[in-house]
Amino acid sequence: MTKESIKQNPQRIFSGIQPTGNLHLGNYLGAIKNWVSLQSDIPSIFSIVDLHAITVPQDPAKLRSSIHEVTAAIIASGVDVKNSILFNQSSVKEHTELAWIFNCVCRIGWLNRMTQFKEKAGKNREKATVGLYNYPVLMAADILLYKASHVPVGDDQKQHIELARDIASAFNNMFKNEKQEDFFSLPEPLILGTATRVMSLRDGTKKMSKSDDSDASRINLTDTRDQISNKIKKAKTDSNPLPETLDELKTRPEALNLINIYAALSSQKTSSILEQFSGKGFSYFKPQLIELAVDTLSPISSEMRNLLKDTKEIDKILKIGQEKAKNIAEPILKDVKNLVGFIN
């Protein structure tokens, strides 16, 4: 599904981001930048998914701080809260109500196939929380609560959209209205941009992550100009010049990552970047990337700092978003309850 096809048949998108603090370049290029570009083409609902955040232990004070920080980052990046809906997930109780109903629709076998749980739980699977195992059901509720037609996601989230589609289909088969019509349409994943999966600056085979012990592995949205510059200067590369074709980068993950970052920041295709820099070494390429990254990210970090000076204003924005979200969610959940057989 492309942005062009959405323009031809606009419906509604829903997307969320966890308030884990230390948002980095991967979060910006993989999610927030796309939100900004989509909001003018289709009605958009964006959520700071704090219920998902507590699937792993969180310090309450840090969680509140992270919700403010992520909200500030989204606004500073260009999401227009007057035309789009922005709210924190836990403030709209309908998310958890619908998730419970979906728990009674979803099959255990479907959740057992979810690869992200296996990755996140690792060897401590028996000690993982039920929430970590079950959060894809809540994600399905997040999407279907607003009857979202499209969901901007990274490559690693496509499986969760497939589960949301399975749950929607199962619900439609279990509960019919008088006209025997399907209640939920099936949401489509929307994967946009070149750098949907941004890799570590220190290891091009690993995803950029805030949990990496090395701060040099990522560019944080709160980094200063000097920090951005130094991290790119020290980013791992190789001694070979940049090639002409993408195929020649398949065995050079660090080089491919930097090229993809440049392409995503400049909203160009990877092939176009290779045309510009083919035959050049990283001593030439990196300064160009530094200039682009600094010019793009510094205004965001500066505006974030301004917004975070008054968190009460951020709370007001989230409250307005909450009310807008509830206006959509409440009647949809009421219809769901009627189909299930509850007395409202």
Image (tube, rainbow, N blue to C red):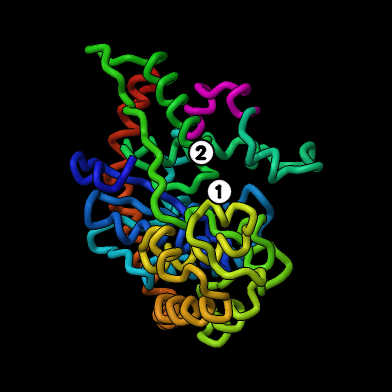
Question: Which mark, by number, is residue 138?
Answer: 2
Residue nearer the viewer, 327 or 225: 225
Residue 71 seen in this snapshot:
no
Mark 2 surroundings within 10 Å by alpha-carbon count, few (fewer than 14), some (14 through 19), many (20 or more): many
Residue 297 in the image, given as x and y percentages of width and height: 44, 76
Q: Amino acid at mark 1?
A: His
Query: Does 22 sit left or right of 81 as displayed?
Result: right
Q: Amino acid at mark 2?
A: Leu
Q: Earlier in the sequence, mark 2 or mark 1?
A: 1
Residue nearer the viewer, 99 or 147: 147
Q: Assign the C terminus to one quadrant of the image.
A: top left
Membership of 106 in magenta stretch? yes
Residue identifier under label 1:
52
At a point 58% along the width and 70% down the height, the residue shown is 241
Q: Is residue 67 above or below residue 144?
A: below
At a point 47% along the width and 51% down the height, the residue shown is 90
At a point 33% along the width and 22% down the height, the residue shown is 338
Residue 143 seen in this snapshot:
yes
Q: Which residues are magenta?
A: 99-112
Residue 334 in the image, given as x and y percentages of width and height: 32, 31
The answer to whether the residue labelled 2 contacts the one labelled 1, judged by CB atoms less than 8 Å apart, is: yes
Kindly indicate the quadrant of the structure image that contains residue 198: bottom right
Dominant secondary structure (helix, strand or loop) of the stretch shown in magenta? helix
Residue 98 in the image, given as x and y percentages of width and height: 44, 33
Residue 216 in the image, given as x and y percentages of width and height: 66, 74
Q: Tell me how far mark 2 sits from mark 1, CA to CA.
A: 8 Å
